[in-house]
Image (spheres, rainbow, N blue to C red):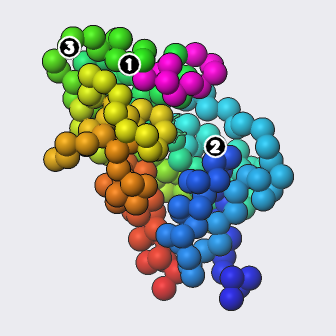
Amino acid sequence: MNENLPKLVFATQNPNKAAEISRLLEGCFVVNTLADLCHTEDIPETSDTFSGNAHLKASFVKNKFGTDCFADDSGLEVEALGGAPGVFSARFAGASKNDAANMQKLLDALGKETHRKAQFRTVICLMIGEETHFFEGIIHGHITRKAKGENGFGYDPVFIPEGYNKTFAEMAATEKSNISHRGIAIRKMVSFLRERSI
Ligand code: IMP
């Protein structure tokens, strides 16, 4: 029964991310979110690295609620832009976190540049008992010249993963999560937790 399973708090306000990870941890952990703890404010993400921000969010939850928890931070790194937008991916075109404006700013910044290699990266910070562990996922690809596809979010319509000829936004959710940075990092954490709970 679920009541007997250990609980893990996922420091996110995003119900889709929480549902995806709950499915992967089914039968092993019960995943609660900040909403389950009635915490509705954003947790500050002031670090200049993904691992720093993931650690800030997980530590916030651990200190405030004393529970085992994890947090993630992700973004897009474009080689020709020296790794930008990186940790500023959500706010690249301003504080309103507008996906369309972010994508347009990216396409404008690249202009006719032919070197369009990029990667998405996710880092998860897990705090369990007295231990802290990090899990990373990276997917390499390139930035298109025009947005294509209706699915997903963020920069999905302008990112084609290596070995594919369609954007993330042209993929079904499961096809994307089988190869995505987030999927890779999540599966690393899930195998770690499943091995520990045997
Ligand atoms: P988060 O840390 O997962 O919330 O991601 C921060 C920002 O990075 C998002 O708001 C998006 O702009 C971008 N991003 C992260 N993951 C993805 C993805 O899978 N597709 C498209 N954009 C993403």
Q: Measured along the vertical axis of the image, is residue 177 above or below residue 101?
A: below
Residue at image mark 3 = 113
Q: Which of marks 3 and 2 is in front?
A: 3
Q: Earlier in the sequence, mark 2 or mark 1?
A: 2
List x then y, in percent, for residue 40.
Answer: 79, 43
Q: What stretch is highlighted in magenta?
A: 94-103
Which of 26 and 46 lies nearest the eye of the viewer? 26
List x then y, in percent, for residue 80.
Answer: 25, 18
Q: Measured along the vertical axis of the image, is residue 31 above or below residue 73?
A: below
Residue 131 in sight from this viewpoint = no
Q: What residue is shown at x 57% (from left), y 44% (from top)?
A: 55
Which of 87 and 24 lies nearest the eye of the viewer? 24
Residue at image mark 1 = 106
Label annotation for residue 57: 2
CA separation, marks 3 and 1? 11 Å
Q: Measured along the vertical axis of the image, is residue 189 above or below residue 55?
A: below
Kind of residue sitting beneath label 3: Glu
Q: Is mark 2 within 8 Å of ligand 1?
A: no
